[in-house]
Image: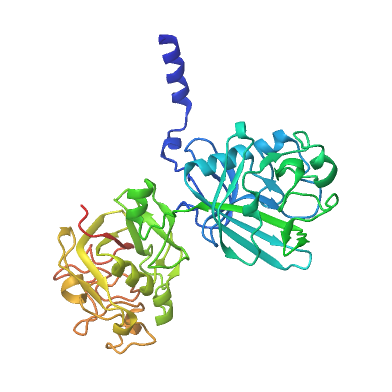
């Protein structure tokens, strides 16, 4: 026993410690998967499955892809069980992997097809399930929920999977040339893997006719989607603890918004990031400030429209971090922040600060102020003069301006300070928000 323990400790000593800090996405809907592409997902938390994630369409995992007409899918039973090909080209994820996916949570199915004339078709189903290997991966498909194809695939429910070396009366070997779910005698209504060279019928039966397609996809995603509205929800519900770029969903939008999440501080959503106070990246017009701009890890502004939605969908607190070149960091937090709609010029309302090392200028000077930019600068030309959009005050333009490049007081000015004060000019500045009442 002691010898085994020594061996185990030896193995642990050579494992990169960073491995334990890595996040392993369980699906293509994971907030850490922020763009379309090939990914390994871990539906059971252990076993990786290589899929193409279509984030643009809502986090679909492509488990089958036929990219061209050929006999690529005339494969053995073993190939179909374990998978083959490349997700960007001809690909089958493997029955074991697909089974693993559908066991983790209820899945919905999407099928996309196109013919030689590039006509495009799709159909979606409310549920998709396959049974175990013992039952030859018996198929279960629910009702159609959307699409421009006539539903015949749900009629394939209770069909078993076969390949040319696990065949029904040589039907697959001689007629179809593709592993698929077939009824007794080799009958089918839909066969997306079937080879056009051997096909006597077609890929999809519709209105009494057989349709043949040159390209086809099968895609899965969870029926009950996780749609976090801020970084704290990702931390709390998704269990992701690593700082980085993630997808969130604003209001009822189906289109994800990318944000940078500071998880190690407690799930803060970064809405402004500035890494050089002399940089003029923030000298922008109203439309830019409304829609957002910049690089999430560099100079960045989330956008007033997004900020308004973030603070309206639930009560939010605000945090400001500032630091100098020597990383002399200061911060201040506000228990609540609210940004009004565009009709009120995205007016900001703040409660007085309850925590931090910086003086509270934001609520006393900038609270209740509308937002101004250089192309709509009716507030004493503050945005034009100081090269940045902000919630400017009519009395002194600003005591805090994290976007300004041309300064008289610095981005953050302590009481009674001038431009030479140590705290007055900081190179690194951030604004972050998260749900209120969190410590």
Q: How many numbered marks, from 0 up?
A: 0
Residue 399 relative to residue 217: left or right? left
Q: Residue at x 38, y 65 (%)?
A: 276
From this viewpoint, is residue 42 visible?
no
Q: How is the image coloured?
A: rainbow
> Does 355 sit above or below residue 308?
above
Residue 262 relative to residue 409: left or right? right
Q: Residue at x 81, y 50 (%)?
A: 70
> Does 6 sit above or below residue 407?
above
Q: Position of residue 28 (x, y in %)?
A: 52, 51
Q: Position of residue 257 (x, y in %)?
A: 44, 64
Of the pair 141 and 227, the residue shown nearer to us: 141
Q: Position of residue 280 (x, y in %)?
A: 41, 73
Q: Residue at x 72, y 39 (%)?
A: 162
Q: Position of residue 86 (x, y in %)?
A: 68, 46
| Quadrant, the N terminus | top left
Residue 221 relative to residue 94: left or right? left
Q: Answer with the quarter of the image where residue 93 lies.
A: top right
> Does 8 sit above or below residue 427?
above
From this viewpoint, is residue 100 visible?
yes
Q: Residue at x 66, y 64 (%)?
A: 149
Residue 216 relative to residue 353: left or right? right
Of the pair 434 and 294, the residue shown nearer to us: 434
> Does 303 sit above or below residue 158?
below
């Amino acid at each position: 026993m002691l010898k085994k323990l020594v061996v185990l400790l030896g193995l642990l000593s050579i494992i990169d410690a960073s491995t334990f800090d890595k996040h392993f996405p369980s699906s293509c809907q994971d907030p850490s998967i922020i763009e379309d592409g090939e990914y390994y997902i871990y539906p059971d938390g252990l076993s990786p499955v290589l899929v193409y994630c279509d984030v643009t369409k809502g986090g679909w995992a492509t488990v089958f892809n036929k990219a061209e007409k050929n006999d690529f899918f005339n494969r053995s039973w073993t190939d179909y069980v374990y998978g083959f090909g490349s997700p960007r080209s001809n690909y089958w994820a493997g029955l074991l992997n697909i089974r693993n996916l559908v066991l983790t949570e209820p899945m919905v199915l999407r099928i996309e097809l196109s013919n030689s004339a590039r006509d495009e078709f799709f159909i979606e189903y409310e549920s998709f399930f396959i049974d175990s290997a013992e039952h030859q991966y018996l198929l279960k498909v629910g009702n159609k929920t959307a699409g421009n194809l006539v539903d015949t695939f749900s009629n394939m429910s209770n069909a078993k999977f076969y390949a040319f070396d696990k065949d029904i009366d040589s039907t697959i070997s001689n007629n179809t040339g593709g592993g698929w779910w077939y009824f007794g005698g080799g009958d089918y209504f839909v066969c997306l893997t079937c080879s056009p060279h051997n096909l006597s019928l077609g890929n999809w039966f519709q209105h009494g006719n057989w349709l043949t397609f040159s390209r086809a996809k099968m895609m899965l995603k969870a029926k009950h989607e996780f749609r976090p509205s801020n970084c704290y929800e990702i931390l709390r519900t998704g269990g992701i603890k690593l700082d980085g770029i993630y997808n969130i969903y604003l209001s009822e939008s189906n289109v994800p918004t990318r944000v940078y999440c500071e998880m190690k501080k407690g799930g803060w959503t970064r809405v402004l990031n500035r890494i050089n106070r002399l940089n003029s990246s923030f000298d922008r017009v109203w439309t830019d400030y409304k829609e957002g701009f910049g690089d999430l890890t560099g100079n960045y502004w989330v956008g007033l429209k997004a900020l308004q939605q973030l603070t309206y969908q639930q009560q939010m607190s605000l945090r400001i971090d500032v630091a100098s070149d020597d990383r002399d960091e200061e911060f201040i937090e506000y228990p609540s922040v609210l940004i009004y709609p565009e009709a009120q010029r995205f007016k900001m309302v703040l409660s007085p600060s309850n925590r931090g090392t910086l003086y509270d200028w934001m609520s006393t000077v900038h609270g209740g102020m509308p937002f101004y930019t250089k192309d709509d600068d009716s507030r004493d030309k503050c945005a034009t003069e100081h090269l940045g959009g902000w919630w400017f005050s009519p009395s002194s333009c600003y005591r805090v301006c994290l976007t300004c490049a041309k300064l008289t007081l610095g981005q953050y000015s302590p009481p009674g300070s001038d431009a030479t004060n140590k705290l007055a000019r900081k190179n690194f500045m951030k604004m972050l928000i998260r749900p209120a009442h969190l410590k």
